[in-house]
């Protein structure tokens, strides 16, 4: 896929077929994640790939709202990817904790690579952290940042309406709206 097609294709998917994902494809997604920039290249995060059914069930039970589709999606998808990070292995500037940034960029790389490979994903942030740590034996000094199911989508989802660029993008100073050429698209 072309890059902008990948951007367009990625939406949050929570219904999955249980078809297997080949090891080659998982390897490529992980390699793409690990290409992400990180604070001083310290790579404060680690990924855990879960394909064990019992572990997936434990993770599904850790989702904040167990009746939510997100919990079911963790059970249904063939794999789940989790990113965890150690705050002591990244920087902090003006109270901005960069382990969160490191992890978010890497996870988004992973998610876009999964999209390129033809799989659906959904960033899930609402879970009981201690339950996830217990289920996967994650050390105390790591924070669990996010997880995503990965698998062949069983639903077609369009993008939700995204925000008006004029309200969210400024040029040169605050509140000076950036305006696009009226016919410009990100895709040619
Ligand atoms: C930081 C973050 C946390 C999120 N947590 C959850 C979550 O716990 N459960 C869920 O179903 N979706 C979660 N999402 C997915 C968002 O709801 C979704 O990205 C948003 O509605 C936009 O839809 P789209 O991804 O299809 O563009 C999260 C997304 C982000 C970036």
Image: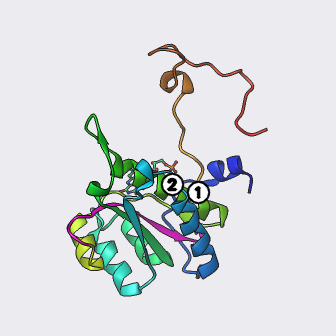
Q: At numbered mark 1, what does the secondary structure look like: helix, strand or loop?
A: helix
Residue furthest to the right: 188
10 Å crowding of disc 1: few (<14), some (14-19), many (20+): many
Any magenta on residue 180? no
In the displayed structure image, the side of residue 128 where residue 78 appears, left or right: right
Image quarter hosting the C terminus: top right
Could you say where residue 53 lies in the image, as x and y percent from the top left?
Answer: 40, 85
Q: Is residue 179 above or below residue 66?
A: above
In the displayed structure image, the side of residue 67 where residue 120 appears, left or right: right
Residue behind mark 2: 108
Residue 55 visible in the picture? yes
Tell me which segment is drawn in magenta.
Answer: 139-156
Q: At numbered mark 2, what does the secondary structure look like: helix, strand or loop?
A: helix
Q: Across the whole image, how many numbered discs are drawn on residues?
A: 2
Question: 13 and 31: which one is in front?
Answer: 31
10 Å crowding of disc 2: few (<14), some (14-19), many (20+): some
Which residue corresponds to the image point at 31% horizontal and 57% vertical from the top-left?
Answer: 89
Residue 112 tag number: 1
Residue 73 visible in the picture? no
Could you say where residue 95 lies in the image, as x and y percent from the top left?
Answer: 25, 38
Q: CA distance from mark 2 to mark 1?
A: 6 Å
- Image quadrant in which you'd find residue 85: bottom left
Which residue corresponds to the image point at 51% horizontal and 13% vertical from the top-left?
Answer: 176
Which residue corresponds to the image point at 64% horizontal and 53% vertical from the top-left?
Answer: 9
Q: Is residue 67 above or below residue 6?
A: below
Image quarter hosting the N terminus: bottom right
């Amino acid at each position: 896929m072309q890059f902008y097609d990948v951007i367009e294709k990625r939406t949050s998917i929570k219904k999955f077929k249980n078809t297997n994902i080949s090891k080659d494809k998982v390897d490529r997604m992980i390699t793409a994640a690990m290409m992400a920039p990180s604070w001083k290249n310290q790579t404060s995060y680690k990924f855990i790939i879960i394909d064990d059914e019992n572990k997936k069930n434990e993770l599904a039970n850790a989702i904040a709202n167990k009746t939510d589709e997100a919990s079911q999606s963790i059970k249904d998808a063939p794999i789940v990817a989790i990113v965890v990070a150690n705050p002591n292995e990244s920087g902090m500037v003006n109270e901005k904790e960069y382990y969160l940034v490191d992890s978010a960029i890497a996870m988004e790389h992973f998610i876009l690579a999964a999209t390129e490979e033809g799989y659906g994903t959904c960033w899930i942030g609402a879970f009981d952290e201690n339950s996830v740590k217990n289920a996967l034996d994650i050390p105390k000094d790591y924070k669990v940042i996010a997880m995503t199911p990965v698998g062949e989508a069983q639903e077609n989802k369009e993008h939700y309406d995204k925000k008006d660029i004029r309200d969210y993008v400024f040029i040169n100073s605050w509140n000076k709206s950036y305006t696009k050429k009226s016919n410009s698209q990100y895709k040619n």
